[in-house]
Image (cartoon, helix red, strand yellow):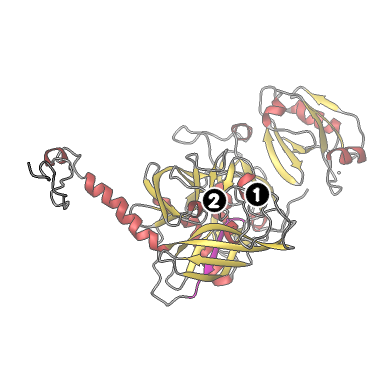
Amino acid sequence: MPEDAGREEPSTGEDIVFDSLPSSVKTRLPPGLHDFQQVFADAAEKAIPAVVSITSEHDVPASEPGRYDDYLENGPFHYFFGSPDGSREGGPSRDGGPSRDGGPAGPKSRKETGLGSGVIISSGGYILTNNHVIEGADRVKVRLSDETEYIASVVGADKPSDLAVVKIKAKLGKLPTLPLGDSDKLRIGEWVLAVGNPYGLSHTVTTGIISAKGRKNTGINNYENFLQTDAAINPGNSGGALMNLSGELIGINTAIFSRSGGYQGIGFAIPINMAKKITRDLIRDGEVTRGWLGVSIQPLDPDAAESLKLKARDDGQAPRGALVGGVVPGSPAETAGLKRGDVIVKVGDAEIQDASDLLNRIALLIPNQFVDVRVLREGMTLDFKTRIAKRDEKRVAGAHVESDEDAGHPAGLSVARLSRDLRQRFGLDKALGRGVVVTAVDAGSRAATAGVHAGDVVLEVNRVAVDDAEAFAVAMAQAKKGNKILMLVNRKGNVLLLGL
């Protein structure tokens, strides 16, 4: 028998055949599935070149705590701004200084860096991102999808909205951009893509849906009207793109709800329609100009609505709008004729849903223009035309009496005339010249349910001024049994209407 009998010749690989899905099975896939998949791929292909990675560098003394940790550690709502190593805290700085959680002694200062994202919105090099991505940075670096890196200049930043614009110098017409869509047309359940730089993994694309619109009162920003999405976003995604399947930018990813600091299915994006005016102002003036009406506003809760005798809407739902808690003297609102207790239900052509909605819409108006305002007042619908002034963020609304005897009331609260001791006990402003201070609120009482706090200063009861405990008791006694009581209070300088 030959020596090589039974041996197989080495394979060249030409005879190797891999299994594939039989064509008969492929035809069973749902019609249009391939086209549906292509929509996502096409949208991502449009977005990736226009989304950039942003590195902010900050020179800090070695003894100073990390400036980026607070974005990740305060409560369940987090900015998702990543550290360069992807960790939530700690990690050595890149210049060889000491780590943020201790370690060997190093130089007197160190370079701390953070990672975020941005979106190119103009071929001239303008990039939209979050304010918290670049805030306080000594240097801002931008890296494109082709790995080209630029030093960026900060054009303008707006902390109340958490938006900022930076600019890189590149050849005109050479930068890819992402067109701006219309976030008002988004529907809950609509598919979206998030593109950003999570944990330094540049140009990561995730997908999800619009989970909710108009999210407010989260405490993240001063001006809130968030889009909520379940697209996976994590530290480093801050300032990145939320886009629709047409390849349009419809939001700037800003924060997440998380008890771990990472993705838990709830993310928030600033809608692009809110960002458009802010972006234009930042590019043109380097700051944002906002409108101001001159009213203090608060939510219209069911108790306040009942106290004001507001009727249900035509569709049977509870009345909506923003309750005017006070009018600033000399303001456009006072000049136009608005009063405390009015409920603003319409501004221009826009129906006002709540206090946050009014705040956002007035802020986006151009100062010195005139706008129609519709209010509900004592069962009547009234229309006013008012000028919009320029908002000064330093303007504050503010609103004093003596004897310490407490007066209790069946509604569940005790009051006393203002005195030096009570001012000191509750930290009340010395400028307060009238009203009675709430000294105690019974747990589970009508007052507690309505949100009355010890330390509140009651100015009026059912529109009647109260300057001492006796006047308060008389006003409360005159309220018909079973009817709602409307109470005007000053709480640490903020004037509120409470219904109980």
Q: Report which quarter residue 437 is drawn in.
A: top right
Q: In which quarter of the image is the N terminus?
A: top left
Q: Over which residues does the magenta segment extend?
A: 160-169
Callout 2, which amino acid? Gly
* 453 over 120 or under it: above or below: above
In x, y percent, where is residue 147?
44, 66
Left or right, 5 with respect to 90, comes to: left
Residue type at mark 1 is: Asp
Q: What element carries label 1?
A: helix
Can the viewer see residue 486? Answer: yes
Tag 2 residue: 86
Q: Check the image and report above or below for 492 versus 292.
A: above
Q: Where's residue 291, x and y in %?
A: 60, 60
User: How many numbered discs sit on the rendered protein?
Assistant: 2
The front one of 440 and 352 is 440
Q: Report x, y in % for residue 106.
A: 72, 59
Residue under pointer 1? 70
Badge 2: how crowded within 10 Å, few (<14), some, or many (20+)?
some
Quadrant (top left, top right, bottom left, bottom right) of the C terminus: top right
Tag 2 secondary structure:
loop
Say if the magenta span includes residue 165: yes
Callout 1 crowding tier (Cα within 10 Å): few <14, some 14–19, many ≥20: some
Q: Nearer the viewer, residue 440 or 432?
A: 440
Q: Which residue is drawn at 83% across and 39% down?
A: 426
Q: In this view, does 488 lie above or below 236?
A: above
Out of 119 and 488, give the one closest to the viewer: 119
